[in-house]
Amino acid sequence: MLENSYSVDLVIPVYNEGKGIKQVLNLLDTCVKTRFRVLICYDFEEDTTLEVVKNMNVSYPIVFIKNKGTGPHSAILTGFEESNAECTIVFPGDDIVNQKLLMQCICSFLMDVKLLLLVDLCLEAQ
């Protein structure tokens, strides 16, 4: 593992998620109990998500990553390329319903299950 890496990187592809992203990030702040960071992958500088997230106060690092292409698939791939964590999980920026699934993924990893997890619920919803 790289010296400055985290146990878990949560890749969150966004597209104007300004309304729902606060609830998701606050949820992560209270329910994830391991060393993690969030990678916000966005398409354009005017995305409403960016300003909302920049004004939040959370206990974990947030990294903003400009999508190398366009669209959710490209954002996910860009996030994976930028991740240096032992475990990388994709989590939608507007999904507060699946916190249990997210925690199951993280717990499986922490119990030494060596898997690369992809929870790609945002593509499924489209």
Image (cartoon, rainbow, N blue to C red):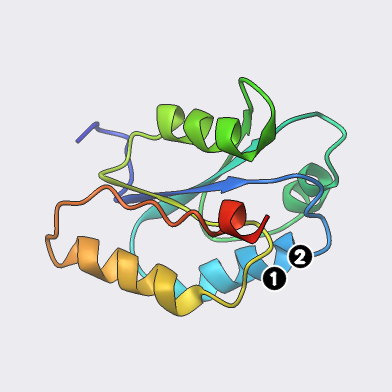
What's the amino acid at mark 1?
Gln
Q: Residue at x 82, y 55 (%)?
A: 18
Q: Residue at x 82, y 29 (%)?
A: 45
Front residue of 119/51: it is: 119
Q: Is residue 24 left or right of residue 76?
A: right
Residue bearing mark 2: 20
What's the amino acid at mark 2?
Gly
Q: Is residue 50 left or right of residue 70?
A: right
> Which quadrant holds the C terminus?
bottom right
For disc 1, the neighbor class at 10 Å (few under 14, some 14 to 19, many from 20) is: some
Q: Residue at x 45, y 29 (%)?
A: 82
Q: Is residue 82 left or right of residue 14?
A: left
Q: Quadrant of residue 112?
A: bottom left
Place of residue 87 in the rendered image (x, y in percent of width and height, measured from the top left): 29, 48
Question: Does dot 2 land on a helix, a strand or a loop?
Answer: loop
Residue bearing mark 1: 23
Place of residue 94 in the rendered image (x, y in percent of width and height, measured from the top left): 69, 63
Place of residue 3 in the rendered image (x, y in percent of width and height, measured from the top left): 25, 33
Place of residue 32 in the rendered image (x, y in percent of width and height, measured from the top left): 42, 69
Callout count: 2
> Which quadrant holds the N terminus?
top left
- 89 lies above or below 64: below
Disc 2 + disc 1, Cβ < 8 Å? yes
Question: Does dot 1 land on a helix, a strand or a loop?
Answer: helix
Q: Residue at x 83, y 62 (%)?
A: 19
Q: Is residue 36 left or right of residue 11?
A: left
